[in-house]
Image (cartoon, rainbow, N blue to C red):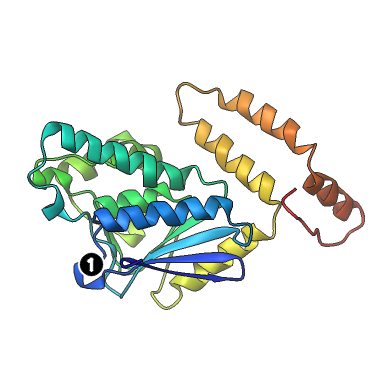
Amino acid sequence: MNTIKTEVKNRILYITIDRATKLNALNKETLADLSSIVKSLYTDESVGGAIITGDGPKAFVAGADISEFSSFSIEQGQQLAANGHESVFDLIENSPKPVIAAINGFALGGGLELAMACHLRIASDNAKLGLPEVTLGLIPGYGGTQRLTQLVGKAKALEMILTADMITADEAKTLGLVNHVTTQDELIAKCEELLTKMLSRAPLAIGAAISVINDFYHKDKNGFKAEIEAFGKLFGTEDFKEGTQSFLEKRKANFTGK
């Protein structure tokens, strides 16, 4: 892949968007590469979760590559957004394996939308976050209007989107937009700490929790009913038997994801 570097270590898939000279802006090729990588995350049994970051010290992802769509028609614009939702952003959000965004610098436009599609967001203290699309005569098109509202509430989402202002990492943490703020040097280590802890838990239960929590935000789904069904199904797993038995035997559980 020309736009993304990957590495697997200790069951963690490291995904680095490798366009530092363009501040890691998302272009068509990058989105296609991301889609392919996230699909592999679903099926690769050697990997339990992923960390997504951007190359270099300046940016996570500083937006989309505007030159690629500046002459698009209405239909092309709608298709651009629809394809992004289906092939990348929704795919990340619905991954049964946890995905953490390591925000190392600017996370703007499509970059912030990418981070918001991840399950957790950890930011370095130099990070700046925002959705500046209205300065281009657009609105966020990769789920930004919806996910930002879910994370920070209607009033703050409106303020950020309508003013196009950036916020600092500390303000983002106060708003609940990011989970933790660290130094740049400690950013990946903090993500590894959190993800390693998740990987020590029962994989099927982790996936079920992600799915049921996501159901809360779907108007056509009953999250309480989904929780009951998922809770019951987990009683039929080997991980449930191992988890309860290890608890009773006062030993560490050895989960297999079965």
The extreme bottom residue here reads: 185
In the visual, does 127 lie left or right of 226? left
Q: Quadrant of residue 194?
A: bottom right
Horizontal and vertical percent position of residue 42: 55, 50
The quarter in which the N terminus is drawn is bottom left
The extreme left residue here reads: 71
**Residue at left offset 60%, top offset 58%:** 48
In the visual, does 50 lie left or right of 128? right
Helix, strand or loop status at disc 1 = loop
Q: Nearer the viewer, residue 35 or 227?
A: 35
Q: Quadrant of residue 211?
A: top right
The extreme right residue here reads: 249
Residue 9 higher or lower than 85, as above or below: below
Residue 102 higher or lower than 89, as above or below: below
Q: Nearer the viewer, residue 12 or 252?
A: 12
Horizontal and vertical percent position of residue 156: 28, 41
Asked whether residue 120 is in view, the answer is: no
Asked whether residue 92 is in view, the answer is: yes
The residue where tag 1 is placed is: 23
**Residue at left offset 61%, top offset 27%:** 226
In the visual, does 221 lie left or right of 66? right
Horizontal and vertical percent position of residue 5: 39, 70
Horizontal and vertical percent position of residue 41: 52, 55
Q: Quadrant of residue 256?
A: bottom right
Residue 37 higher or lower than 94, as above or below: below
The extreme front residue here reads: 1
**Residue at left offset 42%, top offset 54%:** 36
Q: Amino acid at mark 1?
A: Leu
Question: How many marks are shown on the rendered structure?
Answer: 1
**Residue at left offset 40%, top offset 47%:** 117
